[in-house]
Amino acid sequence: MTATTKKFTFAEYLKYNDGTDTQYELVDGELIPISLGTGKHGGISKFLERSFDDESAKMGQNWTAQKFSVGVCSPRKGRWDTSRIPDVVVLPTQQWEALSNREAVIELNETPPTLVVEVVSESTQTTDYRSKRSEYAVLEIPEYWIVDPIQEIVTICTLVEGFYDAVVFRGQERIISFTFSQLDLSAEQVLAGRK
């Protein structure tokens, strides 16, 4: 006898509540619990959220960075829906405010976020480098950061003609971001989660 897993539509996913504080991504119709990650994971995410907010203000951009709180529908091919929750999302403040009275998920027919970040953990390495990279490119998210404390690298993926060009930064190399061109952070600072 084989056990079957209940498949969820996107609409069912948005309404799902198992009575716990567990957050889930929806991947091909299956609920995948999101772990809290290590303290380092959370520290990097919070540091980038604050850094992006500070940089947005310096640039005069009306953007907001949000940590663990905005979902992004995925255009994965297949019969079932997928929705990701990046570690950090940068989006226009007006778009964030429009999500205040509904589930904070950017749907396929809406403007994609300006930038998303995934902080790699042991359990997400393949997904962050492969699946999410291709999904975020198809969504036309202009910039995708893969912060990898395991390999001690920061990979900045910039969308060019529908595909991501990737540049890897290590140690004291200054991060070069298309979105935040004046950002003054090294890979080492990002990976430490502090200046």
Image (tube, rainbow, N blue to C red):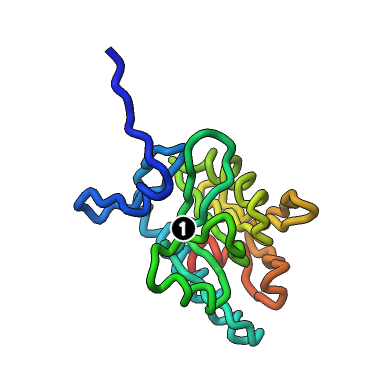
Q: Residues within 10 Å of mark 1 (few under 14, many from 20)?
A: many
Is 119 on the left or on the right of 130, as rendered? left
Q: Is residue 26 visible?
A: yes
Camera-side residue of 123 and 101: 101
Q: Is residue 194 visible?
A: no
Q: Quadrant of residue 52?
A: bottom right
**Residue placed at 53% from the left, 41% from the top?**
127
**Residue placed at 46% from the left, 47% from the top?**
121
Residue farthest to the top, as pictured: 1
Residue farthest to the right, as pictured: 161
Q: Quadrant of residue 103?
A: bottom left
- Name above or below for residue 177 compared with residue 72: below
**Residue placed at 47% from the left, 69% from the top?**
66
Tally of numbered discs: 1
Residue highlighted by disc 1: 71
**Residue placed at 67% from the left, 73% from the top?**
180
Tell me the element at label 1: strand
- Name above or below for residue 170 compared with residue 82: below
Is 106 on the left or on the right of 187, as rendered? left
How far across and how far down the image is residue 20, in percent? Answer: 21, 53
How far across and how far down the image is residue 37, in percent? Answer: 37, 52
Image quarter in which the N terminus is found: top left
